[in-house]
Amino acid sequence: MATTEENGSLFPIFILTMMALSVVPYTIVRLSRFVTRKTKTIHCQCSVCSRSGKYRRSILKRISNFSTCSNLTILLLWVIMVILVYYIKITSRESQPFEPFSILGLEPGASDSEIKKAYRKLSILYHPDKNPDPEAHKYFVEFISKAYQALTDPVSRENYEKYGHPDGRQGLEMGIALPQFLLKFDGASGGILLLGIVGVCILLPLIIAVIYLSRSAKYTGNYVMHQTLSTYFYFMKPSLAPSKVMDVFIKAAEYVEMPIRRSDTEPLQKLFVAVRSELNLDLKNIKTEQAKFWKQHPALVKMELLVQAQLTRESASLSSSLLGDFKRMLELAPRLLEELVKIAVLPRNPLGHGWLRPAIGVVELSQSIVQAVPLSARKAGGANSEGIAAFLQLPHFSEAIFKKIARKKVRTFQDLRDMGVQERHELLIHAAGFSDTEAHDIEIVLEMMPSITLEVTCETEGEEGIQESDLVTMYAWINLSRRNGLVGALPHSPYYPFHKEENFWLLLADPVTNEVWVSQKVNFMDETAAITAASKAIQETKEALGASVKDVNVAVMRAIEKVKSGSRLVMGKFQAPAEGTYNLCSYCLCDAWIGCDTKANLKFKVLKRSRTGTRGHVVEEGAPVEDGIEEEEAEEEEGYDDYESEYSDDEDDEKEHNSKAVNGVLNVKGHTSSESSGSDEE
């Protein structure tokens, strides 16, 4: 057993090792996230976003951003680790192994005469008679004299040269990495050691487990309370209109638990007057409606008014306490709305279909909150059949400005995007009355807006046609382009005080029955993850079909090139329903931009099951029929009853799309309703 001094010297090494095992990986993860985040800060450069201060990187803001609790903790741990390394280095020098040849400055195997000569030289330097320094005397007695004695004694020298130690072969030494005072098992030290063992080995893991379990029992993986999900699930209805989505959204437990202060009563009453027109109150019974509104739970009243303050851009009049709640509400909104979409598309029937109408309503609410545009601006009226919400997200735009450009036959947002750069500049200057700087800001935002196209393929792998109970696989390529050439970017959102990434929801749905067959969220910021997912999906599909290695590699390389050029692959599976013809629509909805959503209509026929089941489905007898996919005709599209937002009339023409049916594979290409024309890219 090693001495207690040697055991005590192991304790700093043990602490350093345990700290490094957790601090080093965590630091690497944080640095990688920081580097990735730096690549994501491609944001709008218009003057409105610049004045908002959201992207301003002053010294004080950088210090405040760095001075978070986690960052300071990591920095402190690294300082402690550096101190431990320095301490270990110093103590290791002091506790170096006894090496007589090194002490005397000789090579191993030196002769007796060389040893005596070296001893005399060192004696002149360190002997007490020659050097009165106490440190020199200590070094002479403890090292030089012992080294000389070890080498001049034949047995000691032989042991050293043979076993590396003057005393001969040494046994295996083991130590305990604890402080030296804990190894003296007398008095209170034994109790301290016992308490330390119990605390570290029993109490600490128990406390960590209790904290983790209590938190996991309260929150989901997306940091949303389980109570919120239960509430959303209870109030979610298949016919939930977009105007009613907010009533469900504000019932989140995170919002209900916000403090209710008496001092907020007067500011909330003033805010109520400012946003009253957006509260869907019956003007004929305005007094009754107002009384009914204020009789709601105080937390619901407060949250609805704060959301309306964001939509109507009335947050500047909020008090300091309400402003804190307002920012907290906006900070939580994206994750709550994401969970609300997931609950809307949650499987509700035996075929695993969700609800389309509430899902679209939630995404529309998300768009309005990010862009700070009232829900009433989506209502069709006058010269515009789709509302003016998309125009209001542009900098310097207002309803009066829209009326001016509407006189120049610009009735829809797509009309404005489809104009040439020079033509649009002249319109904004002469018709709208903007300055050159303001017109330039609008052009910057239009260049940032994404244009989306869809390429959807539905197939039954390894089979011809789609028959009842087949497992159908949907492959959807979402292609994104911007006039400024970027793929991943942060949206123009000067009134939303936090960084908000663009998220897209792909929904394969039947608008007639209000059912969502496939749903998935898509993000264009992480190209590496998209390449990995697309490569794996293409490789597994090709290998399942028995393709050669060369064909698999070629397909994977093509997928990688598509991802790098701004495309994302979405896969989904659904069970083919009963025999019949189905009109489906693939939606791609953006949660940050208004007017960038796209859809593609498709029509396919499910055949009666005739082939032998190999997937565990019931086999049904029936004569073979022709290919299960029918080409959709133009005249059928015109009468197609598709779902639109309740805020816009269904007056738009159906978008042109191609559909081909070959061996049971349906290819559908859809283009965004806000896609820029070629003249925009001049």
Image (cartoon, grey):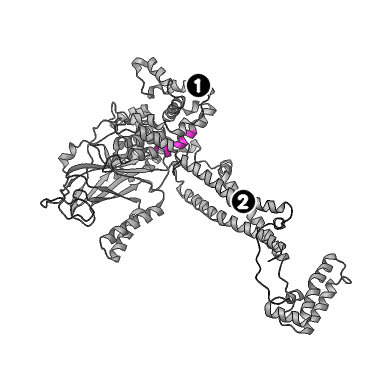
Is residue 206 found left or right of 393 in the rendered image?
right
The magenta stretch is 327-337
Residue type of the residue flagged with mark 2: Val
Is residue 287 found left or right of 203 in the rendered image?
left
Which residue corresponds to mark 1? 265
Which residue corresponds to mark 2? 198
Secondary structure, magenta segment, majority class: helix
Question: Residue 260: x and y, percent?
Answer: 51, 26
Judging from the image, what secondary structure is the residue with disc 1 in? helix
Q: Quadrant of residue 287?
A: top left
**2 vs 1, front mark:** 2
Q: Residue furthest left?
A: 623
Residue at position x 72%, y 62% in the image? 5
Residue type of the residue flagged with mark 1: Thr
Nearer to the camera, 147 or 153: 153
Judging from the image, what secondary structure is the residue with disc 2 in? helix
